């Protein structure tokens, strides 16, 4: 990608971020950055469910066990019992079990603190080498636990960025790499969080609320909704800013 294209994309991202901040404000970050292991497990629990249910599952593990070493002593079926409220219990308990066992085997320590000194690319490589951990989960660790300027791409971010025309991709991983290193310094948390809010509250998969959308004037989506929806709802609880 040539320098001009990178500069143009950076400017577009800056504009989107400004419009989102004008509407939603600057999202609050957690007062204390959560431990990387907390974030990776929280993100595994968040797959295909809402933040409220994944938060309940996360709290079930944190409140019933002293630490992740204790959880590492459980079998997948026992982990599953505690996290079933988040759905996909078998798949998620297996991913958590395998992650904890891998850490125990590799370094005899249930911790991811060693990644803090590594570059973004090294961290993405290492975390995605664990079964059940993809680019989205690994990038959440970078953003939420290490405060790196990285924007994880979930289904909301993917849908919004394609509809407004910033990218033209058919999967979140490609979008992640398209915008990587093009987010103005220090803005990734706000950009990511407000895009999710926009996707939940306005740019829903069907019947997006275009007439009231804060990105209407820059959005290139061809099938914009023309009527104003009445069931506007505010949904601002964000799991990964509430793990402590
Ligand atoms: S104008 Fe419509 S399609 Fe475009 S981002 Fe807003 S809600 Fe989504």
Image (spheres, rainbow, N blue to C red):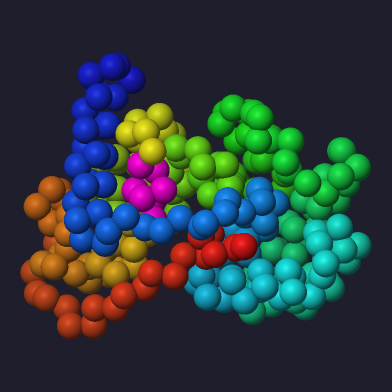
Q: What is the x, y in percent for residue 162?
A: 28, 48
Q: In which quarter of the image is residue 209?
A: bottom left
Q: Which residue is drawn at 60% across and 63% down?
A: 243
Q: Report which quarter residue 170 is drawn in.
A: top left
Residue 47 as seen in the image, left or right of residue 223 = right
Residue 17 colored in magenta in the image: no
Dividing the image into 4 quarters, which one contains the C terminus?
Answer: bottom right
Q: How far from the left and from the top, in percent, is residue 116?
A: 65, 35
Q: Residue furthest front?
A: 31
Instruction: Report x, y in % for residue 1.
Output: 33, 20
| Viewer-proximal residue among 184 and 225 | 184
Q: Is residue 191 magenta?
A: yes
Residue 157 visible in this rendered orientation of the protein: no
- Residue at horizontal 51%, vertical 70%? 51
- 53, above or below 97, in the image: below
SS assignment for the magenta stretch, majority: helix
| Residue 58 visible in image | yes
User: Furthest residue to the bottom?
Assistant: 230
What residue occupies the far top of the structure in this picture? Answer: 2
- From the top left corner, tell me how far across and down residue 23 is, in percent: 21, 61
What's the residue at 61%, 54% (across, down)? 34
Judged left or right of residue 230, residue 114 is: right
Determine whether, in the image, residue 213 is placed left or right of residue 71.
left
Is 177 drawn above or below residue 137 in the view shown?
Answer: above
Point 84% across, 73% down: residue: 78
**Residue placed most toward the observer, 96 or 89:** 96
Q: Give the range drawn in magenta.
A: 187-193
């Amino acid at each position: 990608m040539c320098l001009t294209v990178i500069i143009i994309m950076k400017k577009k991202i800056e504009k989107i971020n400004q419009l989102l901040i004008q509407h939603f404000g600057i999202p609050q970050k957690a007062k204390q950055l959560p431990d990387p292991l907390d974030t990776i497990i929280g993100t595994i629990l968040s797959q295909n469910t809402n933040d409220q249910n994944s938060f309940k599952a996360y709290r079930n593990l944190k409140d019933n066990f002293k630490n992740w070493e204790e959880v590492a002593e459980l079998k997948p079926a026992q982990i599953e019992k505690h996290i079933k409220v988040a759905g996909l219990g078998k798949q998620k308990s297996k991913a958590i079990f395998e992650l904890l066992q891998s850490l125990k085997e590799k370094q005899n320590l249930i911790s991811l603190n060693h990644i803090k000194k590594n570059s973004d690319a090294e961290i993405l490589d290492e975390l995605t080498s664990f079964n059940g951990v993809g680019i989205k989960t690994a990038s959440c660790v970078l953003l939420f636990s290490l405060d790196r300027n990285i924007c994880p791409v979930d289904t909301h971010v993917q849908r919004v960025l394609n509809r407004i025309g910033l990218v033209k991709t058919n999967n979140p991983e490609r979008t992640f790499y398209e915008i990587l290193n093009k987010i103005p310094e220090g803005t990734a948390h706000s950009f990511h969080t407000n895009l999710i809010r926009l996707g939940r509250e306005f740019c829903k998969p069907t019947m997006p609320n275009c007439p009231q959308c804060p990105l209407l004037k820059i959005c290139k989506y061809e099938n914009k909704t023309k009527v104003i929806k009445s069931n506007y709802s505010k949904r601002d609880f964000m799991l990964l800013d509430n793990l402590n």
